[in-house]
Every structure is written in structure tokens, then in C-alpha cells.
Image (cartoon, grey):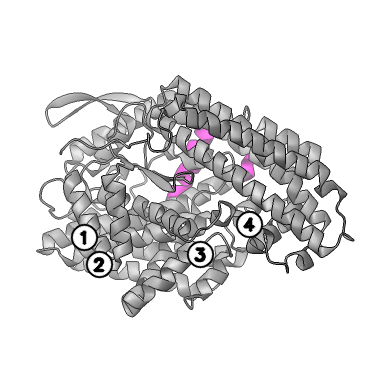
Amino acid sequence: MEKLPRWEMSTIYPGELNSGELAADLAALASTMDEIERHRTQGLTAASTITPPAELARLLDRSVDLFNRANLLSANLEAYVDCIVATDSYNTAAATKQSEVEIAQVRLRQEWIRFQGWIRSLAEALPRALERAGSAQAHAFLLREAEAQAAYLMSEPEEMLAAELSLPGANGWSKLQRTISSQITVAFEVDGATQRLPMPALINLRTHPEEAVRRRAHEAEMREWEKVREPLAACMNGVKGAAMALNRRRGRTDCLHAPIDQSRIDRTTLDALLAAMKDSEPVFTRYFRAKAARLGKERLAWWDLFTPSGKTGRAIGWDQARETILSTFASFSEELRTFARRAFDERWIDAEPRDGKRGGAFCSSMPRVKESRVLCNYDGTLEQLSTVAHELGHAFHNECAYQAGKTELQQVTPMTLAETASIMCETIVNDAVLASAPDSQEELAILENMLVNDSQVIVDIHSRFLFEKEVMERRAHAELSADELCAAMERAQEAAYGDGLDPRFRHRYMWTWKPHYYDANLNFYNFPYAFGLLFGTGLYAIYRQRGAAFVKDYLRLLESTGEANAADLAVRFGIDIRTRAFWDRSIGVIASRVDRYCAL
């Protein structure tokens, strides 16, 4: 393939880490925090439930405006330095700057906690204050949510200490996991040449057409994780131990309580989603068995899960990937195509796998300049084509909020809804590529790619949920050894994959490299992906029925995902996410793909 792009970061801060603009934003963040503190001590502390509604509204307006300014500066600084570190974990200057930003963010987090406590003390007076036009009224949903979540705060001194200790504590364990996993390289022979591959490139060999290569790559990966499993087990215990301690002190009922609230759903919705995922096992077992039969096996080994089927010709070069995405996005809306072309032309995407770069993919919002950046590890496969489309969907989601003039606080979107645009864009590309398949072999290859993704987001995500639930529950009583973590992972994979996977060849070290397990602020970073896939699939089905008339309503949905809970937003499209029926219909769409796959 042609040379893969690295992203352009100078439009965000022209001098990069030594940028005067970056230093100015850090200073502006500190200055804004001083203003927030003065407003709290000189204004908020004097207010009470008998303060006139007009005065409370004025105080709330000022608070919202200050927090918006601080959050915009904080988000931009964090996203920028995180992107630098994500592509070069050896960059010590970037790591130092990242630490500076994180320290500044602790103060912001502390002030928001104090503000939440103040709102809760005025709960009876809040509704009348929000009746008056202004910044507070425009952020009414967020303020009511903040007041409700304040019920799960510790005392103010405890919360201040917890915020300060998060950096050397859980966040430190997260950084260690990212550093260890991003700096592993492996000498590996493929296609007659030995190369030293970074771990993401080695993992990408799971799509190699030759089983001998896939198996050797899988075994090499297992050996590398074996070498670092003890420090990574310490990271897991550190992150989950901190989460469990805080949940307990904050009065959370169990380890799922906070993630459910963060996702802006309820337990009824989660139970319906999980039940649909569990009951979909026969659908995916049928797919796994059909795939195994194509490979001349009874059941799949782990290294077979991502094996391509059919024939797609040569690898998909970067230029071809660009043109495929742009042409298929155009079929949905001109706004989407124009936006994606800008992302390609202005080099918002870092696609090249390399040593020191983290694996996987993500999209990061740069609100100061109203741009996004996309990271992926492109290898010319259909899987990676889908990944680029997926991450551009996240970027388009950001763009919709920017264009609608939404503030930083209004853009705070839960993970469940954050996947809406990404799944839509991925599905648009996959369906268009499938519809244009010239023969059955090409159709088979495209269906394979779609079902690999579907099975990962439903079946493997289910295993990740089961694994994390067991780990969280057991971590409340004692640390887990590396062997215990491996055993828990294998139990979870057995429960989720059932008879579809050869029990001799699972991936006992999946817990080592998935960064989702090590997020210090977000536990159960798994079921929202399944929610997103099935919610996006359901929306796509509505789009197929309504056509262009759907697009306007859809864009309005993307603008407002930070301003309502998931159930209320879904009702706009006649969807009830609290019942099994909706989730089962989306599973049915996937089942039809399995039917076609088995028929080919």
C-alpha cells in the first residue's frame, strides 16, 4: 500500500508541545478556575433556599458559563496531549505535559463536585430558578442530572482527597498499562521476511489468509503477554480496587450502579439488552459453525475468528479506502461526504501502525478549533476500512454539535449514545460495499467482515461484561492473581461463545491489552458498544424505510445526545429501549446476514 498518513496537529497548537497557544490555554484554564473559586466563595455560599429565584438563576448562569469555558480549555488540552502520547509513548515531554494537564483537571473536578453539592442543597428552589431564560435553563437537563448524582458523593473533604489521589492512584495504573502494552515489539517472520512488529501490527495478522501465520502470530502474542502479565494484573487490581472502594463509600448499590447512570439508561434497559445478547447465542453459533466448516474444522480456534472468507482481490489501499468512504457517505447525505472529505484533506487521521503507538482506534474532539482527530492502525483489510468509517462517524457526531452551537457541557454524551453516528457510518459503508459486490465470493468476503464485527460487539462484548462483573465483585474482597484473571476470562468466553469456539484455543490474555478495563473513570466500558451497535442498527433500518426524510431528524438527534437520556431520545423514532422487542429486531437484522452467509 501507499504511505499511510500521520495526523496534522499544528492547527491545534502551532508550536506543538512548546506552543505559546498551549501555554496560554493552560494559563487561561488556571485563571478560569480562580474565577470559579471566587464565584463559589463570594456568591454561591451566601445563597440559600430562600434566595429569590431571579438571583439563583443569575448565580447558576454564571456558574454554567464558567464551567463551559473551563471544560472547553480542559478538553482541548487533554485531547491534544493524549493524542501525542497515544502515537508515541516514548515521548517523555508529552508525558510531562499530560501530567500538567491532569493536575489542572483535578482542580476542575473538585470545583464541579462542590458545585454539585451546592445544587443539591438548593434542590427545592432549583425548578423555579430554571424557569428563567439564560445559560442555566439551556443546561437544565445537565443541572438536574448533577443534582440527582450528588446523592452519591462522599463528604466534600473526602471527594477533594479522592480527586487528588486519582492521579497517583487509579490513573497511574492506567498509564502503566498503556505504556507497557504500546512498547511491545515482536520479531516475526511473514511472507518470507522477518520484521520487528509493534503489538497492534502483530494482532492485525489475525486476518492473514494463511492459518499457519495466524496461529504463529497468536502464539507469539500469548508469549509476550505472558512476560508482562504480573505488572498488568497489578494495574487491573489497582484500577478496579479504587473503583470498588469509591463505589462503596459513595453509597452505590453495586458495581453496575455508576456505569448505568453514566450511560443514561436504567436497569430495565440494561437487562433487556443483556437478555437479547445472551439469547442471540444460537444465531452466532450457527455463524461460527458455518465459518469453521469453511475452514475444514468442527469449531473455531481463537486465531480463526477474524479469518477472511471469499475473495476481495488485493488489499484496499488508503486512496481506495478514502474514495469508497466518500462515495458511500454521499449516498446518505452531502453534509456527511463534505465533512469526511475535509477530514481526509486536512489530515485528521493517523493510520500508520508503528512502535510506541497504541493499538485499536479512537476519535478525539478538539473543541478549541472545532475539529476532531482519528487514530487507527490501517492494514488494508475490510475490517480496517470499516474502522475508519466508524471513527469518522464519531468525528461527524462532534461536527453536528459544533455546527449547532452546543456548549462543551451540552456535548457530554454517554457511551451508549456516543456510538450512534459511528455505527451508522460503518453500516452505510458496509451495506454499500455489499450491494456492489460483483460475485458471490466478494459478497461472502464482505458478509464475513460484517459478521466478524457483529460477533465481536455482541458475543465478545458479552464475554467482556461477564469478565468485568466477576472481577469487580471478587476485587471487593481480595486482589486477583494473573492466573485468576486468566481463568475468569476463559469462563467468560466459554459462557459467551458456547459451542462456537474450540475450548482448547481461547484468548486467556484478552484482559491484558484491552484499554477499556483500565479506564480510571469509566467501568464496564463494554455494554455501551452493544447498545450502540443494536441502537444504530435499528436506526439504520428506519433510515432504509424513510430515506432522505430520515436524515434531518437524525442530524438533530446527533446534536442533542448530551441533553436527554437514551430512552427519551429513542422515543423520537418510535423506539422503546426498555423492552426486548426493539433489541430482538436488531438481532434479527444480524440473523438475516448469518442466513445469507450460510447460504453462500
**Residue at the (81%, 59%) spot, across then down:** 55
Mark 1 or 3, nearer chain start: 3
- Left or right of 406: which side holds 227? left
Looking at the picture, how far across and down is residue 349, in whole percent? 32, 42
Number of the label disc, if any, that sits on residue 331: 2
How far is mark 4 from mark 2, CA to CA? 36 Å
Looking at the picture, how far across and down is residue 113, in whole percent? 72, 45
Three-letter code, disc 1: Ser
How far is mark 2 from mark 1, CA to CA? 7 Å
Label 3 secondary element: helix
**Mark 4 and mark 3 in contact (Cβ < 8 Å)?**
no
Q: Quadrant of residue 430?
A: bottom left
Label 4 secondary element: helix
Q: Which residues are magenta?
A: 473-493
Three-letter code, disc 4: Asp
Mark 3 or 2, nearer chain start: 3
Mark 2 is surrounded, within 10 Å at the Cα level, by few (under 14), some (14 to 19) or many (20 or more) other residues, namely: some
Which residue bears the numbered disc 4? Answer: 261
How far is mark 3 from mark 2, CA to CA? 31 Å
